[in-house]
Amino acid sequence: MIRALPLRYWLFGAAALAIVAVWAMMPAQAHHGWSWAEAEQSRLSGKVEKISMAPPHPVLHVKAADGVLWQIDLGNPTQTERSGFTGTTAKVGDDISILGNRSLDKDKMHMKAVRITLGDKNYDMYPERLKAN
């Protein structure tokens, strides 16, 4: 004997299906690789404004000397920690230098860090991407 399900089960199922459909259509922002960034590396210096070590990628917000605020994406959490950079390595207000690849969209102040320098210490997020001088 087949019984009809109560309406609340149908509504729950429809809502769950809608959530899964929306999630499946979203771009994979956390794993976008390097295609959004310039091939040439550039250097940015400034002061640390904010630090987030949360997945999927730790992020620094750095205010450049000209007052512009930049978002700096680090490696994934394991990669970042392997470089020696942890949540306590830098503090808000520290002078910092970043070597990395900036966004192709010049309206976005966004860069993916290859190397971070604090004081005289380098933290290589992507050592294989360092260009020979």
Image: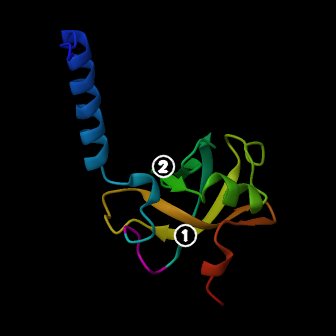
Q: Earlier in the sequence, mark 2 or mark 1?
A: 2
Q: Residue furthest right?
A: 120
In front: mark 2 or mark 1?
A: 1
> For this view, does 116 lie left or right of residue 108?
right
Q: Position of residue 56 (x, y in %)?
A: 54, 48
Q: Quadrant of residue 87?
A: top right
Q: Position of residue 95 (x, y in %)?
A: 69, 53
Q: In the image, what residue type sits under mark 2? A: Gly
Where disc 1 sits, the SS reads strand
Q: In the image, what residue type sits under mark 1? A: Gly
> For this view, does 110 lie left or right of residue 65?
left
> For this view, does 4 lie left or right of residue 54?
left
Quarter of the image with the N terminus is top left
The answer to whether residue 14 is above or below residue 69 is above
The answer to whether residue 94 is above or below residue 7 is below
Q: Nearer the viewer, residue 84 or 70?
A: 84
Q: Residue furthest front?
A: 1
Total count of labels: 2
What segment is highlighted magenta in the picture?
A: 36-40
Q: Residue furthest bottom?
A: 133
Q: Assess disc 2: are there few (<14), some (14-19) or many (≥20) residues with their C-alpha within 10 Å of its C-alpha.
A: few
Residue bearing mark 1: 100
Within the magenta stretch, is there residue 70? no
Image point 23% across, 33% down: which residue? 18
The answer to whether residue 88 is above or below residue 17 is below
> For this view, does 59 lie left or right of residue 7?
right
Q: Position of residue 133 (x, y in %)?
A: 66, 90
Q: Main secondary structure of the magenta part?
A: loop
Residue bearing mark 2: 67
Q: Assess disc 1: are there few (<14), some (14-19) or many (≥20) residues with their C-alpha within 10 Å of its C-alpha.
A: many
Q: Position of residue 16 (x, y in %)?
A: 29, 28
Image point 63% across, 47% down: which residue? 48
